Image (tube, grey):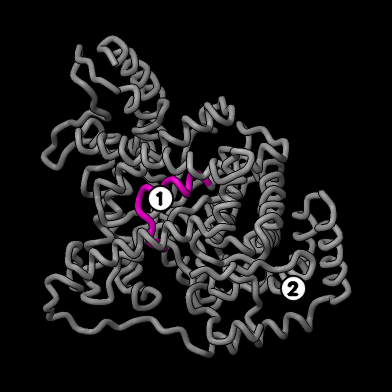
Amino acid sequence: MDAADIAAGRERWQRRYDAARKRDADFTTLSGATVEPVYGPPAGAGYPGFDRIGWPGEFPYTRGLYPTGYRGRTWTIRQFAGFGNARQTNERYKMILAAGGGGLSVAFDMPTLMGRDSDDTQSAGEVGHCGVAIDSAADMDVLFDGIDLEKTTTSMTISGPAVPIFCMYLVAAERQGADLHKLDGTLQTDIFKEYIAQKEWLFQPEPHLRLIGDLMEYCAREIPRYKPLSVSGYHIREAGSTAAQELAYTLADGFGYVELGLSRGLDVNQFAPGLSFFFDAHIDFFEEIAKFRAARRIWARHLRDDYGATSEKALWLKFHTQTAGVSLTAQQPVNNVVRTAVEALAAVLGGTNSLHTNALDETLALPTDESAEIALRTQQVIMEETGVVNVADPLGGSWYLEELTDRIEAEAEEIFARIRELGEDGSITAGILRGIEDGWFTSNIAEAAFVYQQAVEKGDKRTVGVNAHTSTVAKELEILRVSHEVEVEQNRALGARRSQRDPVRVKAALDRMVELARTGENMIPAMLDAARAEATLGEICGVLKDEWGIYREPARF
């Protein structure tokens, strides 16, 4: 790009920066030196390929979505939390919010993630252990007791039974007297990544996609600020993928949901802003920053060129980041504080919109109050003390970083092409479904994980405390343990709730839901009625399993 074009771009950026709202904050170095809000090539200089880098807030958004960077607003501190019963988790949420957290992110236990009630025989021993147990809307009432849902952005990490869980959340908001039109937050809902990596599905892919399409329609019409889909690469990376695989599989899933919305007759400029993304921030510092920058660029280009998006917000890739759980070690766990800080800094330098930092003890158990506070303070130290919020994309123009960004983008494009080849009609959706059926995604991830593990075992990849610097004076950690009494009490409360509700109303609501499942009509209103009647998660998912069947992954060797 020649000097004149670069200068014109800088003038455009300056006008937008001047017109935008900025935080009332000190944007100087620790020594008091003034810093510019963005840096680029020297005045009068050209820069080959600068159109791929650009300016913050301008297509292709490599350098961020907003001309102000974090001078306008910092990322949302959204700590992922959930354990035991709804009352215990409610107390943790209030602690997080009081300590400066900017939003909530709900972790559910395994029975809930699988659409089962706490007293299901398959739930025994798992209730409340990896997240909070939610059986019906009454649990949601307790979970958010004293927390104004109309004013609190709420993320929920669940995919298989995401839609009935979301309906229970809406019922809890109704009971608070909230204006549902004003609710804001994110529901994961991403069923593609379940078949690819995490394995928490209920039905065949097609019924899941039908429910997701219903949800997209309903939110676009009734709850426009709420994001009904968070396309998740986090679990793909945690399963062992490379950074390029995480990026490509995640964005391909996103393109699949765009195709789903278009197939429903929705306007891409209306529904695409309701899609958000969820990425892993791993330990390779510069590779992760490059991944985030490439993600924005790829998404904007494909939404514009392949799917016809014209509005700026439809081209924006907004993403939440979580530091890498798989990078944490049980050996010398205090070192995990350092790993988390480095990973969080990579996410921030990559322009994340919200962030969760893992606690040092999460490889051993759910976080204690103390370790959860350290994780929260890690973000606050980065935000308040390091100066990284002063300049947008401060590493932009680095020869190394730009090369990494270009390389990871090229690898992703090669993967997109292969996915399209897998499908008979050349669409991303057909390719994803074929790749799931053939085990293409899972085999590629398994191979990447195997290669990495070999490198660790040979000592080519070194992990402090595991295969390097293994001596330590550290003592054993005190960890959080979830009492068996949580399961006993949850089941007692669930039994009492069943005995007190109107069984005729519950049956009618469930029957109506199944009736609509046999039509093309949107199922969300009927599912809301079931949640209002205190139908349980297991009952709602159970009648749909009876209607649609369940999915079993083919055995592969």
Please name which of the two marks, 1 or 2, marks the residue nearer to the observer: 1
Q: Amino acid at mark 1?
A: Gln
Q: Nearer the viewer, residue 269 or 27?
A: 269
Instruction: Answer few, some or many: residues within 10 Å of disc 1's Cα (few below 14, many 20 plus, some between 14 and 19).
Output: many
Does 407 sit above or below residue 329? above
Residue of label 1? 245
Dot 2 falls on a residue whose secondary structure is: helix
Q: Nearer the viewer, residue 45 or 28?
A: 45
Question: In the rendered image, which quarter is residue 525 located in?
Answer: bottom right
Identify the residue shown where x is 74% and y is 72%: 542
Which percent across, then down, holds residue 104? 49, 59
Residue of label 2? 539
197 left or right of 55 in image: right
Residues shaded magenta: 238-252
Closer to the N terminus: mark 1 or mark 2?
1
Q: Amino acid at mark 2?
A: Glu
241 falls in the magenta region = yes
Does 419 sit above or below residue 482? above
Identify the residue shown where x is 28% and y is 49%: 346
Q: Is most of the magenta stretch helix, strand or loop? A: helix
Question: In the rendered image, which quarter is residue 370 located in?
Answer: bottom left
Which percent across, then down, holds residue 153? 52, 52
> Would residue 179 be visible to someone looking at this image?
no
The residue lying furthest to the front in this view is 557
4 falls in the magenta region = no
261 left or right of 83 in image: right
Identify the residue shown where x is 33% and y is 15%: 11
Does 427 sit above or below residue 83? above
